[in-house]
Image: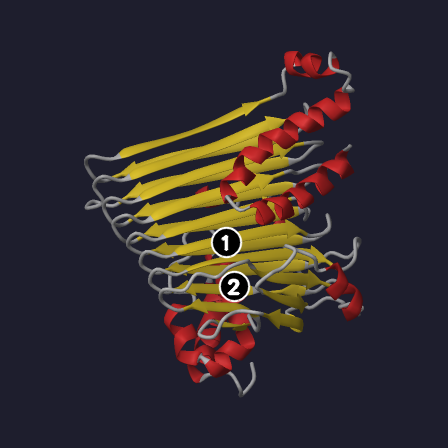
Amino acid sequence: MTSTLPTWFQARQESALARYESTPTPKRGDEQWRFANIKQLRFGNLSGEVLSADHTDLIARSTGVEKPAAKFIFLNDTLISQESSLPDGVICLALAEALEKHSELVEAHFMKQETRLGSAKYAALHEASVKNGLFVHIPDNMEIEGSIEAHHWISGEATVFPHTLVVTGKSSKVRVIDIFRSAYDSTPGLAIAFNDLCAGQNSGLDYIAIQDLNEVSRIISINETSTARDARAKGFILNTGASWARNESLSRLEGPGAHSDMLSVSIPDHEQEYDQRTFQHHVSEGAYSDLLYKNTLYGHSKTIFSGLISVDEKAHHTDAYQTCRNLLMTDDCEANSMPGLEINADQVKCSHGSTSSQISDEEIFYLQARGIDPVRARQLIARGYSVEVVARLENEETEALVLKFVDKKFAKIS
């Protein structure tokens, strides 16, 4: 903590640290950690050895869409590069700068929802430790062409706490992309990341998170989205890296006509474990939410999905869907899925389901008959299986960026 931080933020950090220290560490018997590997929560010393990294090299490696509207590059939560062609009126700053220049605006939206999917202790640690990230505020009636990118690099055995806060005004539109990567392949970093997404009335907010850390790092990523009347929020998560990743996504639909899409593609291999918990909270009547998570598992990898659609008493005419699908590429991988419904209103349309399957011999034979070898055939089928989710981003350059990371992972497996 430094004296340049606003008083309210310092008070929040002090309170959060006390909350972190007083909150018990999750136990094996906790329902919200069912099937999880609790040993992954043994973080040890959070300030390990930090390796120096060439800023010029990392900036060159920070490639995303071809022409981003803005690009921010962070190394261990320190901003090392930024560029922007955003129009006047848009506030797009590193969080540390936004706290200094737009303190009241940040305070109005910073971590307002209750973390309720299991990682309250680590959300408190994040709040107590966060020092940087990305702050975006789009004023009313403004649509941003192109994407705003933030590249988050971890160097050495560092622990980082990146925070992304995006607020859209009435009838505005924006797309934000977070990319998490490791500067080196063999040093185990830790990220405890948080993103606040606040979609104002009749606005559109797309958020894409690409997690491509090295396979000895770990990450806890917590998402809290609020969607106002007639707003549309779309959240997408890609998991290809990290030895262990815990994603918690909460979408709160707060006005009639609110629309939430929750999307994810995960491709674990070797001993990787991806643990995803979701909550679609329908507070207002006449809102729509749709969740589609797809996992393609290789090696001895493991996935966990636990999702709940919750419809409040007055949230009539809710339309909500939840689907998790697992494609098992080996006999040794493990997929656990626990979809759920909690309905307290009438005249609703809700469904949930999960499937786990392997590629059939008929599919492989069909491609072999056309001159494609079995390994390539299985990869093509797995890629096509993921593309269904990626296509729902409905933006060609963003889809191409995501598929670049997808293809990179499949190339490693083959």
The mark nearer the N terminus, 1 or 2, is 2
Q: In the rendering, at what x and y percent does residue 109 appear?
A: 39, 68
Q: In the displayed structure, would residue 180 be above or below residue 403?
A: below
Q: Residues within 10 Å of mark 2 (few under 14, many from 20)?
A: many
> Are dots 1 and 2 in contact, CB under 8 Å?
yes
Q: Is residue 16 above or below residue 318?
A: below
Q: Which residue is mark 1?
A: 207
Please provide percent x and percent y for residue 391.
53, 38
- At horizontal 73% and vertical 42% (from top left) the residue drawn is 408
Label tally: 2
* Residue 392 location (% of width, % of height): 49, 40
Q: Position of residue 190 (x, y in %)?
A: 66, 58
Query: What residue is shown at x 59% (from left), y 34% (from top)?
Result: 386
Q: Is residue 82 above or below residue 345?
A: below
Please state, as top left, top right, bottom left or bottom right, where the C terminus lies in the image.
top right
SS of the residue under disc 2: strand
Q: Is residue 155 found left or right of 110 in the rendered image?
A: right
Q: Residue 5 versus residue 334: which sits nearer the camera?
A: 5
Q: Amino acid at mark 2?
A: Thr
Is residue 41 shown to the viewer in this render? no
The picture quadrant where one finds residue 271 is top right
Residue situated in front as seen by the camera: 217 or 33: 217
Label 1: element kind: strand
Residue 356, disc: none
Instruction: From the viewer's perspective, tell me whether residue 252 is left or right of residue 413.
Output: left
In-image side of 5 versus 63 (left or right): left
* Residue 399 visible (yes or no): yes
In the image, what residue type sits under mark 1? Tyr
* Residues packed near mark 1 inside 10 Å, few (<14), some (14 to 19) or many (20 plus): many
- Quarter containing the N terminus: bottom right
- The residue mark sitting in front, 1 or 2, is 1
**What residue does disc 2 label?**
164
